[in-house]
Image (tube, rainbow, N blue to C red):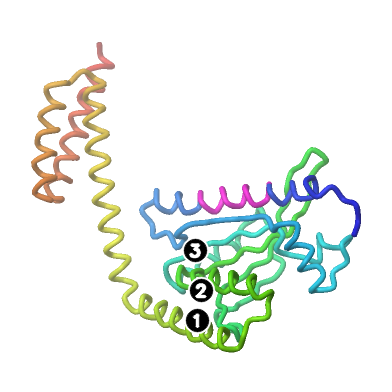
Amino acid sequence: MDGRDWSKFLLPYQQAVEELKIKLKSLRTELKARDEYAPIEFVTGRVKRISSILEKAKRLSVPIDQIETGIEDIAGIRIMCQFVEDIHRVADMIRIRKDLRLVYEKDYITNYKDSGYRSYHIIVEYPVQTSLGSMPVLAEIQIRTLAMNFWATIEHSLNYKYREQLPEHVRERLRKAAEAAFALDREMSSIRQEIVDAQQDFEEKSGIVRKVLNDIQGLYFFRRVREAAQFQLRFNELWEQEDMWSLAELSQEIQAALARAGKNNNSQ
């Protein structure tokens, strides 16, 4: 084993994970802000532990002085989606990015493993800006549904327990569980539009409520206390009645009142 300083060696990978997490989370936020459907449910990331790096290097016969290129998932990003269809949309979004270079892809959804493992992997080269200049870092982006991730997490724990030598009866039960998880994904896809419509209705409702309350606070800022209090009472009543149509009309009234308040304030 070489005598490298592992803490320094892993720094660029840690930076790559944090930056990619921020960028992919921002992509989800941007789509939400545009009132578009966001195929990304949430994003996580990790840097492989030193012990795991060494174990994988041994298993793949990768010399320690070549792990930068021989092990592609030291930096790992995981993107969770609601539906299988979302996985391919997210993959499309990653392919067109200009801040990274796509190395290759592994489709374990169409060509799932014998164990039942399903996921979509994209190996990318991401340039990290360090104090010594730009450094290209390999990272693996895994895109999965929530059901696929649940199964993969359990399998990983069992493989760790049995040191990659799972008993056959455990393997068989895992395969059956993988099929059950994928059946769940197919069932969710069959009612995808109903689910998406319900989620969009919820988002619209939340957006109207947030805007009404923020705009009422805006009236208080302009010292329109009586007007703000009246709007608050009307909001409370409509909220109790769950009358979203009237709440949307109330929002327009408050926006008009805010515009008048701002105009009067500027003319003083």
Q: Which residue is mark 3?
A: 80
Determine the residue positioned at 19% across, 32% down: 256
User: What residue sits 79% from the left and 63% below the top?
Assistant: 54
Tag 2 and tag 1, C-beta contact below 8 Å = yes
Sort mark 1 into few (<14), some (14-19) or many (20+) by Cα contacts within 10 Å.
many
Q: Where in the figure is residue 243, as x and y percent of width and height?
A: 11, 50
Percent coordinates x, y for residue 139 in the rendering: 69, 60
Residue, disc 1: 178
Which mark, by number, is residue 151? 2
Q: Amino acid at mark 2?
A: Trp
Q: CA distance from mark 3 to mark 2?
A: 13 Å
Q: Please determine whether, in this image, residue 58 is positioned above or below residue 79.
A: below
Q: Is residue 234 left or right of residue 47?
A: left
Q: Residue at x 27, y 34 (%)?
A: 214
Q: Position of residue 246 (x, y in %)?
A: 11, 47
Q: In this orientation, which residue lies closer to the viewer: 203 or 113?
A: 113
Helix, strand or loop status at disc 3: strand
Callout 3 crowding tier (Cα within 10 Å): few <14, some 14–19, many ≥20:
many
Magenta segment, which residues?
A: 15-26
Q: Could you tell me which secondary element the residue under label 1 belongs to?
A: helix
| Residue 114 pos. (x, y %) | 61, 86
Chief SS of the magenta region:
helix
Please count the marks in the image.
3
What's the distance in space between the residues labelled 3 and 1, CA to CA? 17 Å
Vertical arrangement, residue 236 with respect to residue 264, above or below: below
Residue found 77% across the figure and 54% down from its top: 136
